[in-house]
Image (cartoon, rainbow, N blue to C red):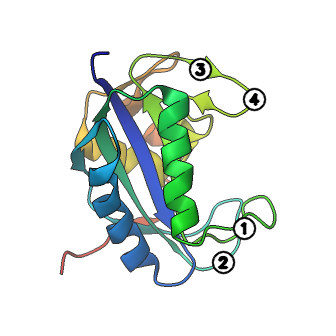
């Protein structure tokens, strides 16, 4: 199978969120049949439709030979290894890894929806994604950049590099 360019959203707002997000990006380098190509800067943003402290977010680009479902399963294993619990919808989380894009595919199953259904309305997804690829196309939606104006009221700050 040829590698598929995929984008993964990384987020944390429980515990040491900065450490969790940074460590998760490092762990993505070890996914089977997958190469971490690059990742965005880290960003801080307030929770949207969620509770808890501010989030630390990033987006990673991987080239993977895993199926979308297998990649999701690997991401969920990583979340569990970081102590992810799901006591209720949008609960604070030690780590959240979302499969945002899987090549040019549109997928809708009971366990996976790609492109991620809320990515066009979330600054913490769009801005890091566009940092990685200003010309990225969201299948079924067009250029990601066309959604930036709609999220311009969402406050998001770049985390200074240490």
Report the label total.
4
* Residue 5 screen position, x and y as percent: 31, 28
Pointer 1 or 3: first along the chain: 1
- Marks 1/2: CA–CA distance: 8 Å
Pointer 2 or 3: first along the chain: 2
Is 160 or 21 nearer to us in this picture? 21
Pointer 2 or 4: first along the chain: 2
Q: Which residue is mark 2?
A: 52
Pointer 1 or 4: first along the chain: 1
* Residue 113 screen position, x and y as percent: 63, 30
Residue 102 image label: none
Q: Which residue is mark 4?
A: 110
Residue at left 47%, top 37%? 71
* Residue 128 screen position, x and y as percent: 34, 50
Binning the other alpha carbons within 10 Å of mark 3 as few (below 14), some (14 to 19) or many (20 upward) gives some
User: What secondary structure is marked by label 4?
Assistant: loop
Q: Is residue 10 above or below residue 119?
A: below
- Marks 2/4: CA–CA distance: 28 Å
Q: Is residue 157 visible?
A: no
- Marks 2/3: CA–CA distance: 30 Å
Snapshot quadrant of residue 46 = bottom right
- Marks 1/3: CA–CA distance: 25 Å
Image quarter where the C terminus lies is bottom left
Q: Which residue is mark 3?
A: 107
Binning the other alpha carbons within 10 Å of mark 1 as few (below 14), some (14 to 19) or many (20 upward) gives some
Pointer 1 or 2: first along the chain: 2
């Amino acid at each position: 199978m040829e590698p598929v360019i995929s984008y993964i959203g990384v987020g944390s707002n429980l515990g040491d969120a900065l450490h969790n997000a940074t460590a998760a990006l490092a762990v993505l380098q070890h996914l089977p049949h997958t190469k971490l190509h690059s990742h965005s800067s880290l960003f801080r943003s307030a929770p949207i439709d969620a509770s808890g402290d501010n989030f630390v977010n990033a987006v990673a680009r991987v080239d993977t030979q895993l199926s979308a479902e297998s990649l999701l399963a690997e991401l969920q294993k990583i979340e569990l290894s970081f102590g992810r619990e799901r006591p209720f919808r949008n609960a604070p989380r030690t780590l959240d890894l979302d499969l945002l894009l899987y090549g040019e595919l549109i997928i809708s199953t009971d366990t996976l929806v790609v492109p991620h259904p809320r990515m066009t309305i979330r600054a913490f997804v769009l801005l890091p994604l566009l940092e990685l690829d200003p010309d990225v196309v969201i299948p079924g939606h067009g250029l990601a950049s066309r959604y930036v104006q709609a999220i311009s009221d969402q406050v998001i700050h770049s985390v200074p590099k240490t």
